[in-house]
Amino acid sequence: MEIEGAKNSKTCKRCKALYDPTSNSSSSCRFHPSFFVSRRHDDQKRYYELGPNDPPYAAKFYDCCVAEEQEAIGCMTSFHISYDDVRLQSYST
């Protein structure tokens, strides 16, 4: 549950949303567990139409789910993790 201005709210490390720790659930946070990269896919297949002068790594995508837009909605869900949290919670889908 995202909230604004509540005094006990925290900011999530992964999705940067402001949230209420008392309503944090295993599906509260939606994020990409990997980076937005600029390189070829591991299997070397061409998924993109690149121009004749583009280098072979010109395709940009999330390494985790192959989404091509940097603003793409996260492909995994889990609990929000606050900057105050010392433990890391495991990913769940």
Image (spheres, helix red, strand yellow):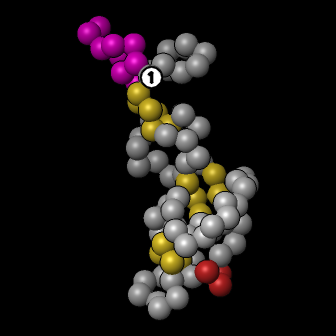
Q: Nearer the viewer, residue 53 or 37?
A: 37
Quadrant of residue 60 within the rendered picture: top left
Report crowding for label 1: few under 14, some 14 to 19, many 20 or more residues within 10 A (C-alpha). some
Q: Position of residue 74 (x, y in %)?
A: 54, 51
Left or right for 60, reference 30:
left
Q: Nearer the viewer, residue 71 or 18?
A: 18
Inspect this view and state whether residue 86 appears: yes
Q: Position of residue 8 (x, y in %)?
A: 52, 88
Asked if the stretch drawn in magenta spans residue 79, the answer is no
Q: How many marks?
A: 1
Residue lying farthest to the left in this orientation: 53
Residue lying farthest to the front in this orientation: 86
Position of residue 68 relative to residue 7, above or below, is above
Q: Residue at position x 48%, y 72% from top?
A: 11
Inspect this view and state whether residue 2 appears: no
Residue lying farthest to the top in this orientation: 52
Q: Which residues are magenta?
A: 49-59
Quadrant of residue 4 within the rendered picture: bottom left
Q: Which residue is mark 1?
A: 39
